[in-house]
């Protein structure tokens, strides 16, 4: 963690007076004096994985005047065709091309950036392929399902000098930005305990193999592409529904589902984007985990906080704050909030705007690859403690559990051929 600079209460309140309206808004770079952006000045975006969340984020890109969606890719026929029609109807042309295999799409030199919203299982793989193809990357959370994969993403985007932004859009939502600035101001005193909500009560992910079903035709559903680098197993349609979110080969379960946001927010507020807690211990039968940083600060990953989805609570020696997606926030002392109100929800517009700005300026976004990796390392290490049903101690710099090969093995997974990265 970096050292914190204390400022006066009055200075903090003056500096954050515009929080409700403009926190998180990224500048839109216009290339024409008239405010109109010529087609050859726009950032060409390809969308990969276009189910519910993917359609939403793709729509956010389509609303940006300095970007244009030119290609869509999905392993399911109905999703890719619906997405292509959606894009063509929006722009009033037939220019959008649909692909089954992302690798074919990445051969196009006219694509500048890729939006990735596949299942969690393929986030890291698709990010690495896109970086190698020279594309900038907006990838939905979580960054990966294994620590070796998110580290590989960091190394690859650095090697190829790509802009990477994880879809942890709450770093660009006003109430969470206010919470970040409040914590960094020193007005809460020294941070003692942070609470990060997980998505549902659970005592760990499962690895169930479902009964085989007849595999669909490639054009209808490309099963091998859906699996990506996960262990191979026979097709069962249930995998492709919500079942995969609680399956250890395809997801980190409850902790990575929301922890990729809430743990990430706590790391950001705590100025810990370059590290992770060192000690992890499951504290009850619901799989809640107490994580401890090197300086003794606690991070509790649990269910049961307030204020909508993905809430966080941060307690210091001189005060505390709690907020979530509802936009509600409570602080102690209450004067820190100064009657501010924040809009609820978690729009992606500011986050997409920041990404496009960074593509142009080559500056790092708030949710950059390195910060996102350490948030995932914390979530995955917490999952290891739950899976082993015992405490574990992490070396965040070496990214191993020293003298604990059983736990260290669970931080990684092997890549299945031909997906060797």
Image: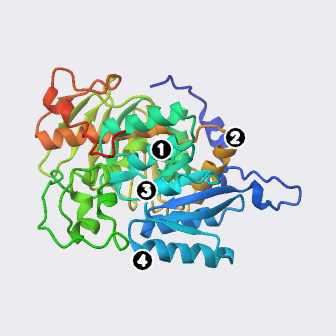
Residue indicated by mark 2: 361
Local crowd size for mark 1, using a 10 Å CA cut-off: few (<14), some (14–19), many (≥20): some
Q: What element carries label 4?
A: helix
Q: Where is residue 96 in the image (x, y as percent from the top left)?
A: 60, 69
Q: Earlier in the sequence, mark 4 or mark 2?
A: 4
Residue indicated by mark 4: 78
**In the picture, residue 86 is in which quadrant?**
bottom right
Q: Earlier in the sequence, mark 3 or mark 4?
A: 4
Q: Earlier in the sequence, mark 3 or mark 1?
A: 3
Q: Which mark is residue 333?
A: 1
Q: Residue at x 21, y 21 (%)?
A: 402
Q: Earlier in the sequence, mark 3 or mark 2?
A: 3
- Which numbered disc, 1 or 2, marks the residue closer to the eye? 2
- Which numbered disc, 3 or 2, marks the residue closer to the eye? 2
* C-alpha gap between disc 3 and disc 2: 31 Å
Q: Which mark is residue 59?
A: none
Q: What element carries label 2?
A: helix
Q: Where is residue 99 in the image (x, y as percent from the top left)?
A: 48, 65
């Amino acid at each position: 963690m970096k050292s914190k600079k204390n400022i006066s209460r009055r200075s903090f309140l003056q500096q954050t007076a515009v929080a409700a309206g403009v926190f998180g808004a990224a500048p839109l770079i216009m290339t024409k004096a008239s405010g109109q952006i010529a087609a050859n000045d726009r950032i060409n975006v390809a969308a990969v994985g276009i189910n519910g969340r993917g359609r939403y984020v793709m729509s956010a890109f389509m609303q940006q005047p300095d970007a244009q969606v030119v290609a869509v890719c999905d392993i399911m026929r109905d999703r890719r065709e619906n997405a292509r029609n959606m894009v063509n109807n929006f722009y009033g042309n037939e220019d959008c091309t649909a692909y089954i295999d992302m690798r074919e799409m990445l051969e196009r030199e006219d694509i500048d950036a890729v939006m990735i919203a596949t299942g969690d299982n393929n986030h890291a793989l698709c990010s690495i392929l896109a970086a190698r193809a020279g594309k900038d990357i907006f990838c939905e959370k979580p960054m990966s399902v294994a620590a070796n994969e998110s580290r590989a993403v960091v190394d690859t985007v650095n090697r190829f000098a790509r802009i990477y932004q994880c879809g942890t859009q709450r770093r660009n939502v006003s109430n969470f930005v206010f919470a970040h600035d409040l914590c960094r101001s020193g007005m809460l005193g020294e941070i003692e305990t942070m609470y990060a909500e997980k998505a549902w009560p659970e005592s760990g992910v499962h690895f169930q193999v479902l009964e085989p079903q007849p595999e669909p035709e490639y054009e209808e559903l490309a099963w091998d592409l859906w699996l990506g680098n996960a262990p191979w197993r026979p097709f069962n349609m249930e995998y492709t529904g919500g079942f995969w979110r609680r399956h250890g080969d395809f997801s980190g379960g409850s902790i990575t589902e929301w922890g990729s946001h809430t743990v990430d927010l706590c790391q950001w507020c705590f100025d810990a984007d370059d590290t992770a807690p060192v000690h992890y211990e499951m504290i009850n039968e619901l799989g809640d985990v107490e994580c401890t940083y090197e300086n003794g600060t606690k991070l509790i990953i649990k269910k049961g906080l307030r204020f909508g989805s993905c809430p966080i609570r941060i307690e210091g020696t001189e005060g505390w704050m709690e907020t979530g997606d509802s936009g509600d926030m409570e602080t102690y002392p209450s004067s820190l909030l100064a009657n501010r109100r924040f809009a609820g929800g978690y729009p992606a517009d500011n986050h997409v705007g920041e990404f496009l700005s960074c593509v142009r300026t080559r500056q790092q976004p708030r949710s950059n690859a390195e910060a996102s990796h350490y948030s995932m390392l914390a979530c995955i290490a917490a999952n290891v403690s739950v899976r082993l049903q015992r405490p574990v101690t992490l070396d965040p710099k070496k990214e191993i559990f020293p003298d604990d090969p059983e736990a260290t093995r669970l931080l990684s997974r092997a890549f299945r051929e031909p997906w060797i990265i």
